[in-house]
Image (spheres, helix red, strand yellow):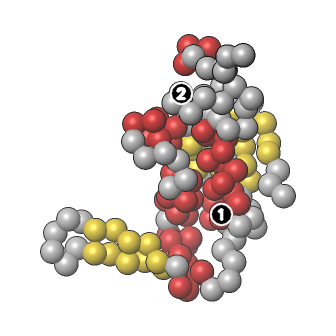
Amino acid sequence: MQSFMQKKENVVRNWYVIDAANKPLGRVATKAATILRGKNKPTFTPHIDCGDYVIIINASNVALTGNKLEQKMYYNHSGYPGGLRERTAKTMRENYPVEMVERAVKGMLPNGRLGRQMGKKLFVYAGAEHNQSAQKPVEIDID
């Protein structure tokens, strides 16, 4: 019996919406990364981008458990000496909620060309409105 291998020309892509309001960041990110990779489909093939499009709304209301708001740090470096910038999760959620959720999801995708291609199918919005209503996305509930 031969294994099934998906061809990139035959991939059927759907659109999904995830509401992140009062949901843990890790749960939202793992669900989104699974859908972006295509692991929720029976036709999953590791070396093909067979995933679907994901829209995450209410990123500014995502929950963090424990003391993560004060203790979790996000780091950026400009490349220059002394160019390290540190921000807490509380600052990120208040000022940059889209970047915070994008980092969590993209960190769970493969590194390299394939992962960057999958990351382009992610759309994150801080509020409840999104621009992809014409694609008729399906709402996904996170337990």
Q: Describe the element under mark 1 as helix, strand or loop.
A: helix
Report the number of numbered marks. 2
Q: Identify which amino acid the numbered label 2 is placed on.
A: Ile
Q: Residue at x 20, y 65 (%)?
A: 79
Q: Is residue 70 visible from the viewing direction of this image?
A: yes
Q: How packed is label 1: few (under 14 Cα within 10 Å), some, or many (20 or more)? A: some
The residue drawn where x is 46% and y is 77% is 73
Residue 90, image x, y percentages: 55, 78
- Does label 1 or label 2 sit earlier along the sequence? 1
Q: Nearer the viewer, residue 12 or 124?
A: 12
Q: Nearer the viewer, residue 97 or 38?
A: 38
Q: Residue at x 57, y 44 (%)?
A: 123
Is 90 above or below relative to 42?
below
Q: Residue at x 47, y 41 (%)?
A: 115
Asked if the residues shown at circle 1 and circle 2 are in contact, with their CB atoms under 8 angstroms apart, the answer is no
Q: Quadrant of the N terminus?
A: top right
Relative side of 24 to 7, left or right: right
**Image x and y of residue 11, in percent:** 62, 20
* Residue indicated by mark 2: 48
Quadrant (top left/top right/bottom left/bottom right) for the C terminus: bottom right
Alpha-carbon span between mark 1 and mark 2 = 25 Å
Instruction: Say if residue 135 shows up in the picture.
Output: no
85 horizontally vs 132: left or right: left
Q: Which residue is mark 1?
A: 26
